Image (tube, grey):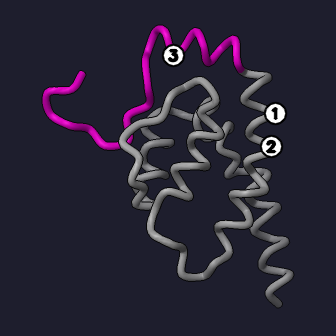
Amino acid sequence: MKKIAMLLGACSLSLFGCGTAVTVLQDDADAARGLRKQKTYCQSIPRIYSGLAYDFCVLNAPPDPTGVLVPLVLLDLGLSGVLDTVFLPYTIYRQGVDGNINIYWRAGRG
């Protein structure tokens, strides 16, 4: 049963939860909402290699009580690294234009 849950989680992660897909292909508010939901300690993530940063921010949060999330995020790190490299020209441009993706908004900061 545990193997089936891991397999389903890995499939859903590869289809919907890839860090690069969340940060590059979705709205900034969606990426920030996902990290706030995980209760990450990160304040913002850069757009350059944002998929890797997203995954590290998921790991930089209170531990997942089920223990399933960590292996899935570790699997996603490799995929995000490759896809972040593919999207690098676009993310460099977006970093220059829009700056970091803010996770927690603070008064007095842009």
Splitting the image into 4 quarters, where does residue 110 fall? top left
Residue type at the position of mark 3: Gln
- Residue 31 placement (x, y as % from top left): 50, 42
Residue type at the position of mark 2: Leu
Label 1: which residue?
82
Which class describes the residues within 10 Å of circle 1: few (<14), some (14-19), or many (20+)?
some
Q: Earlier in the sequence, mark 2 or mark 3?
A: 2
Residue 96 sits inside the magenta stretch:
yes
Residue 50 sits inside the magenta stretch:
no
Q: CA distance from mark 1 to mark 3?
A: 18 Å
Q: Residue furthest left?
A: 108
In this view, the residue in front, 48 or 26, is 48
Left of 27 or right of it: where is 82? right
Which class describes the residues within 10 Å of circle 3: few (<14), some (14-19), or many (20+)?
some
Label 3: which residue?
95
Q: CA distance from mark 2 to mark 1?
A: 5 Å
- What residue span does the magenta drawing correspond to? 88-110
Residue 90, placed above or below residue 36: above
Q: Which mark is residue 79?
A: 2
